[in-house]
Amino acid sequence: MTNRKPGARVGQALIGSGLLLGCLLAAPAFSQLSCEQMRFEDFSTVMDAPTHLTAVGAVKGTGSVAYCRIEGYVSRQVGFELRVPTESWNERLLFQGCGGFCGSLRQIEDCNDALARGYACVTTDLGHKSTPIDAKWAYNNRAAEIDFYYRATHVTTLAAKAIVQRMMAKPPKRSYLRGCSTGGRQGLISAQRFPEDFDGVIAAAPAGVSSGGGLHLIWSALANKSADGAPILSERDVAAWQQHVLAACDGLDGVEDGIIADPQQCDLQPDAFVCRAGQQDGCFTKPKIEVIKKIYSGAIGLDGKPAYRSVPMPGSEPHWVPAYVRDVGPPIYYLFGGDFFRYLAFDQDAGPQWHPEDFDMARDLPRLRSMRMLNNAANPDLTAFAARGGKIILYQGWSDESVPPLGIVDYLQLATRTMGGMEKMRAFTRLYMLPGVAHCRGGVGPDSLDSLTHLERWVEQGQAPEQIVVSKLKNASVAYPAYPLPRENIAFEWAINPYPGGGAPLGKN
């Protein structure tokens, strides 16, 4: 005889009638948890992303919303930080990309604008600890390279969605990624490799879309290095050359405002400025002109042809000084490019003894292809992402000296052909080229745009961003300012059309 607990027959009757089943289905699987309760939650069984929380704490709002700050890692070593609003979550998740070689979580502060709007926000160190220009962590470490190039972004997204769902008792309705440079690469690779991760992506100046990559960085720096190691072009030379460029190209759009609207229209002839016998003013020595020509042309292969098409454009000259020209100490891209080639560029790492001067066109240019399966963000097949309704907003500055702009232009054109033409491509992807803007932001042009609102409206309401307004701020203290912008902080604005359309100034305050 089987012993039954009191009420068992009643339970059976209810099950038989379906009433209990209906109640169970109607009830939520979990109730919402406080930040304090999240300390004890186990996320080790998250599919493909075993996760452990290392720190959880409530943060009171000081000028922003209150939130729960959650730190942890995904096996084996992908660190992350997640911030979840505790009072007014808007049921959205934003992944904030990082820059350079990443290696920290400090870019979480770039989420402040989104957090204030009710977003939960997450970021990752891409699987290692470093500074943005240090890549020693990748030395003979293929697992770390895989994390850096694509896995860390994916598993952090899986972990963040699971944590938010457990804390808020429901999953995010929408998930977005926003980033520039390495962060832009994160966005494009996510759309290409993991189309289910995000509903929309904002990818600015994405690294990894040009075959030039790190070679451009060391080529441009070495072009300005004399035999004795001193820079050939000085900061003063660059400033003088910039004036010649503006004189030739600034007014091509009908407005002389110090901004080159479309550098593709510029027809510069540097040889015309070589000093003739007895000439000193308004000209340059032949070695200096040769440096200028090498920076504009990019590396030349053994066949005498350019090794890549994405090169610095007219208008980028103000940014050459820290990048390639520095009079004191090596320029930043000599350092960054050096570590890229030592530890990340080749299938077999060159190692710490390698220097940019050691690059050999015959030996090393073909070797760059060996890592493209990992680091390439230029896969033009976005079929799966488009099919599920995903949207991509791309933008880049025409004056970008770090990730030259023709890379994203070429990618858009290749993807357009792959996806079946302009109409099909523009149904889910738009590119905006920002005149006079440097890498990610900065420069003389307008560099602040409310990309997150445009993406929300496109994904959630079907409102495609036809023409966007981009602002130049008088005081630009953060990468992503809160919107709406105070009118008193706006210096001027441009209206930018999707590429291949251009833009025009709206006027100055």
Image (cartoon, grey):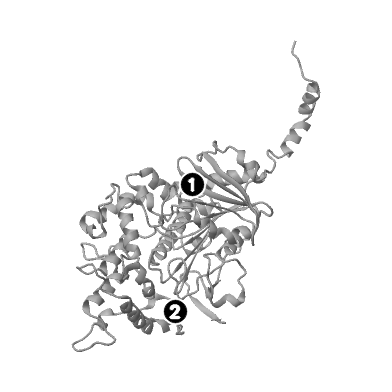
Q: Secondary structure at mark 1?
A: strand
Please tell me the numbered disc located at residue 79: 1
Measure how far apart labels 1 and 2 are at the Cα level: 41 Å
| Image point (32%, 51%), residue name | 343
Say which quarter of the image contains residue 246: bottom left
Give residue 509's position: percent from left, percent from top. 57, 82
Q: Up-down: is 372 above or below 489?
A: above
Amino acid type of the residue tagged 2 in the rendering: Ile
* Mark 1 crowd level (few <14, some 14–19, many ≥20, 10 Å Cα): many
Point out the image quarter for the N terminus: top right
Amino acid type of the residue tagged 1 in the rendering: Gly
Outermost residue toward the bottom in this view: 278
Can the viewer see residue 47 in this picture? yes
319 sits left or right of 2 in the view: left
Please give the residue where the numbered disc 2 appears in the rendered image.
259
Can the viewer see residue 211 in this picture? no
Give residue 454's position: percent from left, percent from top. 58, 64
